[in-house]
Structure formats: C-alpha cells, structure tokens
Amino acid sequence: MNGQTLTKTEVADLRCLAGMIVPASPAHGVPGADDDTIFADIVKSIGRDRDKVCAALAKLRMLAGGPFGTLDAARRNEVAARLRAEGGAPIGVLTRIVLLCYYRDDRVMVSLGLEARPPFPKGHVVEQGDWSLLDPVRSRRPFWRQVS
C-alpha cells in the first residue's frame, strides 16, 4: 500500500469499511472488498480523490469517536449505518472507488459469468437497435451557443 496516500489508521479504517461495503460471499465464491488484492487496488486508485476520501474517513472516525477499525462489530455497523445515512460527496467518492475496484477483480467478473478481460481491444458485440429512436434528438434545434 502507498503510505504517502493514507495514514496507517486511515488504511485500517478504509479496509474495515470496504469489507462492510462489499463483504465476502462464500456462497458465490467471491472475496470482499477488503481482500488483499482488491484492497491494494483501492488504495492505489485513490489518486486525485485523496482529499475526499480522507474527508470521508475523517467523518467516519468522528462518528466512531476514534479509529473505526478498533470498534466491535455491533458498534461498527451502527457507525457505518449513520455514515451512510448522512451521506455526502466524500462518502459517494469513497464508495465509488471501492465498487470500481471490486468489480474489476477477475474473480468477481468470473463469478458474474463474464470473461475476465478488459472490454477492449477485443470488444463486445452490441446488438443493433432502432436508430430511428434518435430522430427527435437529431431534428431539434441546437441548444448550445456557437463559438466563433
């Protein structure tokens, strides 16, 4: 993990929260978002969203009254539910990163019945639809200002 991105406490809190956002499922044979490989991807993917992720983790610590990862399971559930209920952009950003990294893991893709590969360059076949459905959009007047 990149120690420059988050503190040790933030990493521990994030890992605990990620495992609650997407817990492991033995029934489907998939790991949780706190799995070593997936979690390493989460930490590596924070990048430009570092400030918002840190703000979300700070709010989590504030609601927990200290490090979130050290709480017992019942208190963690209570704090996580409150965090989710209060929401906000930083929480949305943190959740987006967790989910994006989780669903790009090969084990998760295979469990969904999808081929574990990027969509390109091989691509995916998309059935042709009724292009006439776009006619109303094509025929309307431009609603943007022309640039000289």
Image (tube, rainbow, N blue to C red):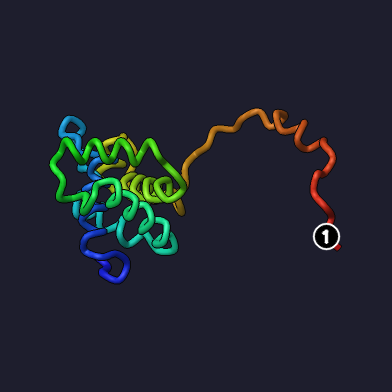
Along the line of sight, which residue is nearer the eye, 110 or 56? Answer: 56
Quadrant in which residue 10 is drawn:
bottom left
* Total residue callouts: 1
Which residue is outermost to the front? 65
x and y percentages locating residue 126 in the rendered image: 52, 37
In the rendered structure, the answer to whether residue 127 lies left or right of residue 46 reads: right
Quadrant in which residue 140 is drawn:
top right
Which of the image's four quarters has the N terminus?
Answer: bottom left
In the image, what residue occupies the spot 44% across and 63% down? 48
> Does 64 appear above or below 1?
above
Along the line of sight, which residue is nearer the eye, 138 or 80? Answer: 80
x and y percentages locating residue 112 in the rendered image: 31, 35
Which of the image's four quarters has the C terminus?
Answer: bottom right
Which residue is outermost to the bottom? 4
In the image, what residue occupies the spot 37% across and 59% down? 46
In the rendered structure, the answer to whether residue 49 lies left or right of residue 143 reads: left
Q: Give, as a three-letter code, the residue at label 1.
A: Val
> Does 68 appear above or below 137?
below
x and y percentages locating residue 89 in the rendered image: 46, 48
Helix, strand or loop status at disc 1: loop
Along the line of sight, which residue is nearer the eye, 8 or 111? Answer: 8
x and y percentages locating residue 137 in the rendered image: 75, 35
> Does 69 appear above or below 114?
below
In the image, what residue occupies the spot 31% across and 34% down? 113
Along the line of sight, which residue is nearer the eye, 5 or 32? Answer: 5
The crowding category of the residue bearing disc 1, from other C-alpha atoms within 10 Å (few below 14, some 14 to 19, many at least 20), is few
Pointer 1 residue: 147
Quadrant in which residue 128 is drawn:
top right
> Does 146 appear above or below 3?
above
